[in-house]
Image: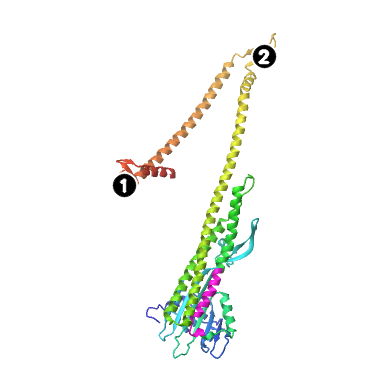
Amino acid sequence: MSFCDYNDIFSDFYGPESTLGENPEIEYIDWFAAEAKGRIQITSARNLIASPEPDLRIIFAPLDLRGKDEETLQPLFEHYRVPPDFVEERMYDVTQGCGTRKYEDGSHCSWMHYLCPNIDIKKTIVTDQNGSFPSVIDDHPDSNHPLHQLSQTSWSWNRAGYFLRWATPRNNKTSPVTLICFSGPKALTLRLKDLAGEPTWHWQKVLTKPYDLFVMVLDELFGQMNAQVQNVSDVFRGIETKAMFEAQKTAERSNEGEEYADHDFVGLHNVAKHCIYLKEAFNAIGITTHEVEGQHERLFKSDEDIETTRAMLRHKKSLFKSVNVRLDSLTKRTDNTINLSFNLVSAQQNKLMMIDSQIMVQDTQTMKAIAIVTMIFLPATTIATICGTQFLNLDTDTIPYQMRVAPHFAIFWAVSVVVTGLVGWMWWLLNEKGVKLQKTALTVKSKHAKQWIKRKGVGHVMTNGQSKAGQPTAAATTGAVIELRTL
């Protein structure tokens, strides 16, 4: 190991109470020179490293998590001399990690870490009048948590690590090659197992071209990542279609009683979040692929076989770039749909306000009709009220009948005038108080505006918004008006 290696990180990784008690079994494949097919076997990590060394070995180990499966990870790390840098990447949960190392005996190792969001969908989970669309499902163990019950949410991730070790061939003799897969896509495991039973696979070429194993790893990682982008795209297509249909209905809707559809802003936000996480993952795997290509170019001499491996690595890098471009387009479509949804809400609210204003106009017309009817019958009502009082009586003892006025009829007018004046005075008093409150509020706002102008330095020098000494320019005045509106 190098002088710069921090080996104590292994103790932090295994945990303070790391003990090798149980012997959990792991699966691996061995290829020997005298055999065309590989041997698929299952045993413990300690038995594996004690077994004879094959020419090619692929180990399917558990995910290299801190404090987990140390009964398996520790023997593998120690036997294959995994560098501390590999463990450090997992300790700090890096999105992208890749490196290489040369040992004292001339052998080499290379590794990479992988992280990508896992987006599982359920077909035809959402059905409405516009069609059936898939929806994101969250298989998190803590499904009762409120965060895992939100629309289109997913909190699961695809993580993996790959460690490749090989020795430089000497005297035209090949050296053993070992690949440890710390978790990873199931498709990669099945692919390698199929190759183990296939005698036509010339596995001996891997002994001189170990990076062909990384080509297969990147190929399966691309398939997994592309599936996540496709799932998000399928979910978003349903949301986008629903938003466009709703926009068309909003433009054509004339029935006042027809209800507007609810907009799933939470689901739309989660889809946008998935796009951001996927974008981060594709940028990271692009850096990793570029670094692997650079490692291969530095460590291997150029010949026909080596150039073939290098061309395949370039092709994998181009595949990741192509899906990344598609992801950029999906991100822009998501932004457009978010803007469309907000504009739809505004348009729908404006239509509802127009309907309310039409109702208010109808109410105004009704009140106007009532006022006209009242004005027509008010004089007659007033006369009838006065004549119906005890101050005016019809004397039937005389012929012809005579209308007699009570001697205290003036009291009626005196009381009426006083009450009317009292009501008018109270109205004036309340109105005057409201005017004073408005003036006080404007005075306070004006005071704050002057303080803002003074704080901004307006009216001191020509470059600070002043045309003449002590006179603010239009820009400064506009700033004061804006400040008044925000107070």
Callouts 2 and 1 close, C-beta under 8 Å: no
Label 2: element kind: strand
Nearer mark to the viewer, of 2 and 1? 1
In this picture, residue 290 sits left or right of residue 393: left
| Quadrant of the image containing the N terminus | bottom left
Residue depicted at x 62% and y 33%: 366
Q: Does the magenta stretch include residue 220?
A: yes
Say few, some or many: other residues with alpha carbon within 10 Å of mark 2 (under 14 / 14 to 19 / 20 or more): few
Q: Does the magenta stretch include residue 421?
A: no
2 or 1: tag closer to the N-terminus: 2
| Quadrant of the image containing the C terminus | top left
Tell me the amino acid under the disc marked 1: Thr
Residue 79 x, y percent position in the rendering: 47, 84
Query: Which SS type dominates the magenta stretch?
Result: helix
Residue of label 2: 394
Residue 234 x, y percent position in the rendering: 59, 63
In the image, the segment drawn in magenta is 205-226
Q: Which colour scheme is used?
A: rainbow
Tell me the amino acid under the disc marked 2: Leu
Residue depicted at x 61% and y 27%: 372
Extreme-top residue of the structure: 399
Residue of label 1: 463
